[in-house]
Image: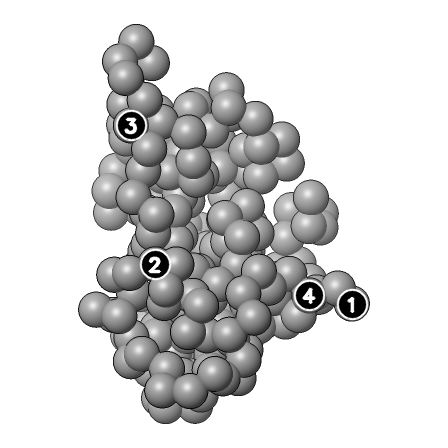
Amino acid sequence: MTSRIRFSTALNVFEAFQDLGRLLPRPIDDAAPLEYCRGLLGSGRPSDATAFLAHLLPRRETVWWARQCVGALIGPLADDPALQAAETWVREPEEEHRRAALDVGRAADSRSPTTWLALAAGWSGGSIGAVDLIPRPPPASACAKAANAAIVLAACAGDPRGIEARLRACAEAGLRFAEGGEARVSVGKAAEGKSRGGSGAGSVAGAASWA
C-alpha cells in the first residue's frame, strides 16, 4: 500500500496549520504523524484523532474519508444534494465542481453532516468569494475543519452512549486510509448511528471505492 500522508512529522502538520494548536496538544518531539494520531486515539478523545487526520490527509482524500464516515453513520444518502456535490468534486476535482459544492453547502442546513461535506469540498481551494470579485482563498484549515464537523455531527446522530465508539471507528478508518488502504468504516451494533429510515448503518466501503 502507498501512504497518502503528505507530512513527515506531526509537528509539520501544526506548522502548516497554525490554529491546530488551539485544538490539539502540540507534539513535543519529531513523532511520525500516524504515531501521534494513534496516541490521540489512545488518550480517550477520538475526536482529537479525527481532527488531526482531517488536517493530515490531502484535502481531496479528507473529503472522501469524511464522506465514508457520514455514510456509515447515518445511512443511505443517494438523494442528498450536498453529499452528491461533495462526491462529484472528489471524483472530478475541477473548479466548476468545487464551486458547485460551495454553493450547495452555503444554501443547505448547517445542522446536517452532509452540508459540511459540501463545504469541505467547496473550501478545498480556489476562491470563496463571488466569481466577479477579487479571488479570496479559504483559510488553510477550512476544508479540514468542515470535514471533521461532518464526522462529529454524524457521530452524534445516534445513541449518545455510542458517540465515542463511532468516532473511534471513523478515526481507525482514517488511519487505514492514510496508510494506503480503503476508508472502510465498521461500526458495531451497539454504537451504530441511525439512518434516516431508522436502521443502523453498520459499515460502508464507500460509494464504490476511492476515486
State the separation of the CA atoms marked 4 and 3.
32 Å
**Which callout, 3 or 2, points at the residue further toward the start of the chain?**
2
**Label 1, on which residue?**
1
Q: Position of residue 208 (x, y in %)?
A: 71, 47
**Which callout, 4 or 2, points at the residue further toward the start of the chain?**
4
State the separation of the CA atoms marked 1 and 2.
27 Å
Report helix, strand or loop for mark 1. Answer: loop
In which quadrant will I find the C terminus? top right
Residue 190 visible in rendering: no
Residue 48: image quadrant is bottom left
Report helix, strand or loop for mark 3. Answer: loop
The crowding category of the residue bearing disc 4, from other C-alpha atoms within 10 Å (few below 14, some 14 to 19, many at least 20), is: few
Report helix, strand or loop for mark 4. Answer: loop
- Determine whether label 4 and label 2 are within 8 Å by CB: no
Q: Which marked residue is nearer to the observer: mark 4 or mark 2?
A: 2
Report helix, strand or loop for mark 2. Answer: loop
189 to 96, vertically: above or below: below
Furthest residue toward left: 22
Q: Which marked residue is nearer to the observer: mark 4 or mark 3?
A: 3
Instruction: Please name the amino acid that badge 1 sits on.
Output: Met
Q: Which mark is residue 3?
A: 4
State the separation of the CA atoms marked 4 and 2.
21 Å
Q: Which marked residue is nearer to the observer: mark 1 or mark 2?
A: 2
Furthest residue toward right: 1
138 to 133, vertically: above or below: below
Q: Which mark is residue 148?
A: none
**Which callout, 1 or 3, points at the residue further toward the start of the chain?**
1
**Label 2, on which residue?**
17
**Label 3, on which residue?**
136
The number of numbered badges drawn on the structure is 4
Residue sitting at x 29%, y 80%: 25
